[in-house]
Image (cartoon, helix red, strand yellow):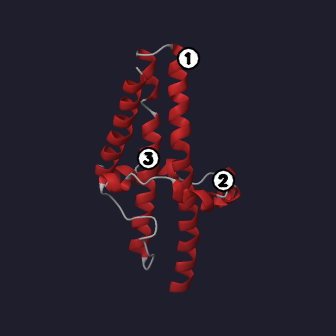
Amino acid sequence: MITKIIIAWVIIHIGVSVLVSQLPASMVLSFSKLYQLKKWERNGRVYERLKIRKWKHVLPEARKWVNQGKGKTAVQLRNEKDFQALDLQTSRSELSHWAQILPSPLFFFFLPVWAGWVMILYAILFNMPFIIVQRYNRSRLERFRKIYQKKQR
């Protein structure tokens, strides 16, 4: 049974990643409210306290598996188009990880109730670090964008 659960999660994670990677930019950006930094995030400073810069590099990049976007270090922000591309990439990644949590209640149909709750907990705990990193990246991107715009004036 555990093998089937693992296979199901692998299919969910990869399937959602591939699906989101193929969505048109307009659809990804239509969830703009989801990506906006909230007041409690204090322009990303809350993520600085989590020391994300020290551990974010250990997270795997599914982008490599679905052949989408640029790598963590490949993006060089030289113009507004570069900022928009990275903004889209962080939004796409965040959307993918939120969407990977959504199927978790389906496990209640196949597993005991306690195990269904374990699956929901797994989905949240697995995806949250990735979501947090994207929100951290977006806060830094906005800071860099403001600096870039000041230099352009």
Q: Looking at the image, which residue is at 45% across and 64% down?
A: 72
| Residue 92 visible | yes
Identify the residue under disc 3: 95
Mark 3 or mark 1: which is in front? 1
The kind of secondary structure element at disc 3 is helix
Residue 19 placement, left or right of 136: left
Estimate the x, y position of residue 129 in percent, counting from the top left: 56, 47
Dot 3 or dot 2, earlier in sequence? 2
The kind of secondary structure element at disc 1 is helix
Dot 3 or dot 1, earlier in sequence? 3
Amino acid type assigned to the residue bearing label 3 in the image = Leu
Q: Looking at the image, which residue is at 42% across and 23% down?
A: 106
Identify the residue under disc 1: 114
Up/down of 51 relative to 82, above or below: above
- Callout 2: few (<14), some (14-19), or many (20+) C-alpha neighbours within 10 Å? few
Up/down of 8 relative to 141, above or below: above
Dot 1 or dot 2, earlier in sequence? 2
Mark 1 or mark 2: which is in front? 1
Q: CA distance from mark 3 to mark 2?
A: 18 Å
Which quarter of the figure has residue 117? top right
Which quarter of the figure has residue 64? bottom left
Identify the residue under disc 2: 41
Residue reaching furthest to the right: 49
- Callout 3: few (<14), some (14-19), or many (20+) C-alpha neighbours within 10 Å? many
Position of the N terminus, as image quadrant, is: top left
| Residue 153 visible | no
Query: What is the count of numbered marks?
Result: 3
Estimate the x, y position of residue 66 in percent, counting from the top left: 31, 52
Amino acid type assigned to the residue bearing label 1 in the image = Trp
Residue reaching furthest to the top: 112
